[in-house]
């Protein structure tokens, strides 16, 4: 007699089980199967709805702007969107997470606020000793984030090539991943100057200032650094098809290289969405033309995309509404809708639901060394589960009440799937449009020791 039984269409990375079921005891999954289910004290029959693993968002920025959402709101949006674990980036405004003490402090503060589980990225400030990397790993960092482009000299600095290589060597010793923002600093700055000199300030300016070559040059450096140091290298967002081909070629040579497709690169395009939304669709690297979007889907179907994430950040509209495109902040909120967006696109492209289980759960867990507890529907793992029902609806961020900001680049978009329930460690944390988990319910999750 199990505690809880969920019935529906069970989705794993390997198969879709019609008339499937998942049995839960306490906080963990006991078993799953198809056909006649076992007995349970509490049964939830979801008909033909999808029973998916709770999502793991590999890239969230909860504290990029002081006075904005923080973990109370990012994790509320996550619960409503079927995301049960977020991996938060280290570039907090005024508080770069670059030492073990800072990582521990952030973990304590986040545990007081979080409604879902969370992992924490670490980084390094230029000039700091590399011993901070090992200390942060011991404190529970899930990976280390660096950048080949200097967004801000203090909050989001560029790591020069030699220091990046030494960082990779230090990260290799921890057994974790080195994740890198992939834009070539020198070329971007040259193109920015050219766009400014030409007087281009409308929506076209951003893409012109960061052409695809700025990404692939940086990715070549990142993957060659991985090859030369033996470190696992992860490109945290790639908007161009050529980048996934590069990643696959290094992987075929035996190196541990991975690449991430943020949901906006799979859904939005430059000529329609950026032209319409302006600063609200300004993201680094840029959203690309539709032909490039289709190239990304080709690589996703071929298995060359490792992870799908949000790169979520809820900038205030004052930072996203300047008519001069280049003066806007980069990034957009999407935690609340990543699962519905991805399922909708998969369905419309006749791609199997297994992609969702793999790219939104299984692979992120592998990336962060969390597979003992997180990442999918399997016996012994945490009962982190998302229920998605087939329903046509129009997304309105003003109506949901679960996002800190009431704007979204996806406002007005028709979706084919809606999250009906989210479960975290065997407890229902979202149902009937309401987030049920309170701040403090989320746990700090750490990588398994090698």
Image: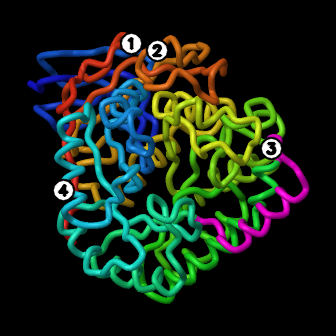
Left or right relative to 363: residue 113: left
Residue 190 forms part of the magenta stretch = yes
In the depicted structure, whether residue 84 falls above or below residue 446: above
Q: Residue at x 39, y 32 (%)?
A: 69
In the depicted structure, whether residue 443 falls above or below residue 5: below
Q: CA distance from mark 4 to mark 2?
A: 33 Å
Residue 51 forms part of the magenta stretch = no
State the SS at label 1.
loop
Q: Which residue is mark 1?
A: 433
In the depicted structure, whether residue 376 falls above or below residue 20: below
Q: Which mark is residue 290?
A: 3
The answer to whether the residue labelled 2 contacts the one labelled 1, judged by CB atoms less than 8 Å apart, is: yes
Tell me which label, 2 or 3, sits earlier in the chain: 3
- Residue 174 percent across, percent down from the top left: 27, 76
- Residue 440 percent across, percent down from the top left: 17, 32
Q: CA distance from mark 2 to mark 3?
A: 29 Å
Q: Residues within 10 Å of mark 4 (few under 14, many from 20)?
A: some
Tell me which label, 2 or 1, sits earlier in the chain: 2
State the SS at label 4.
helix
The answer to whether the residue labelled 4 contacts the one labelled 2, judged by CB atoms less than 8 Å apart, is: no
Q: Which residue is mark 4?
A: 104
Q: Which residue is mark 2?
A: 400
Q: Quadrant of the N terminus?
A: top left
> Comparing marks 2 and 3, which lies closer to the viewer?
2
Q: Quadrant of the C terminus?
A: bottom left
What is the magenta range? 182-204
């Amino acid at each position: 007699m199990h505690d809880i039984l969920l019935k529906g269409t069970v989705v794993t990375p390997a198969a879709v089980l019609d008339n499937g079921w998942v049995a839960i005891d306490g906080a963990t999954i006991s078993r799953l199967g198809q056909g006649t289910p076992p007995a349970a004290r509490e049964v939830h029959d979801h008909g033909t709805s999808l029973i998916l693993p709770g999502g793991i968002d590999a890239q969230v920025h909860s504290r990029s702007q002081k006075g904005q959402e923080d973990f109370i709101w990012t994790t509320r949006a996550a619960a409503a969107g079927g995301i049960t674990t977020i991996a938060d980036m280290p570039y907090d405004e005024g508080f770069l997470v670059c030492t073990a003490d800072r990582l521990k402090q952030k973990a304590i503060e986040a545990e007081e606020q979080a409604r879902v589980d969370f992992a924490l990225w670490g980084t390094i400030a230029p000039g700091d000793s590399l011993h901070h990397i090992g200390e942060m790993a011991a404190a529970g960092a899930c990976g280390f984030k660096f950048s080949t482009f200097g967004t801000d000299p203090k909050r989001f600095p560029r790591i020069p090539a030699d220091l990046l290589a030494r960082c990779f060597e230090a990260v290799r010793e921890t057994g974790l991943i080195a994740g890198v923002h992939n834009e070539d600093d020198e070329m971007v700055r040259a193109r920015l100057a050219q766009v400014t000199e030409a007087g281009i300030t409308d929506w076209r300016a951003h893409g012109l200032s960061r052409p695809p070559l700025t990404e692939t040059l940086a990715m070549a450096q990142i993957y060659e650094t991985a090859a030369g140091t033996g470190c696992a290298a992860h490109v945290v967002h790639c908007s161009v098809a050529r980048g996934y081909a590069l990643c696959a070629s290094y992987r075929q040579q035996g190196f541990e290289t991975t690449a991430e497709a943020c949901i906006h690169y799979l859904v939005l395009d430059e000529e329609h969405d950026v032209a319409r939304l302006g600063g609200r669709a300004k993201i680094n690297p840029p959203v690309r033309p539709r032909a490039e979007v289709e190239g990304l889907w080709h690589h996703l179907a071929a298995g060359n995309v490792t992870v799908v994430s949000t790169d979520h950040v809820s900038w205030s509209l004052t930072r996203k509404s300047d008519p001069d495109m280049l003066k806007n902040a980069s990034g957009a909120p999407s935690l609340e809708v990543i699962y519905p967006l991805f399922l909708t696109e998969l369905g419309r492209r006749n791609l199997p639901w297994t992609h969702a289980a793999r790219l939104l759960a299984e692979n992120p867990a592998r990336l962060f060394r969390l597979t003992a507890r997180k990442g999918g529907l399997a016996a012994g793992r945490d009962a982190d589960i998302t229920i998605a029902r087939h329903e046509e609806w129009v997304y309105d961020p003003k109506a949901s009440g679960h996002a800190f900001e009431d704007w979204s680049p996806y406002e007005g978009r028709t979706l084919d799937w809606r999250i009906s329930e989210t479960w975290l460690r065997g407890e229902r944390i979202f149902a009937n449009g309401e987030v049920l988990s309170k701040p403090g319910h989320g746990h700090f999750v750490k990588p398994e020791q090698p």
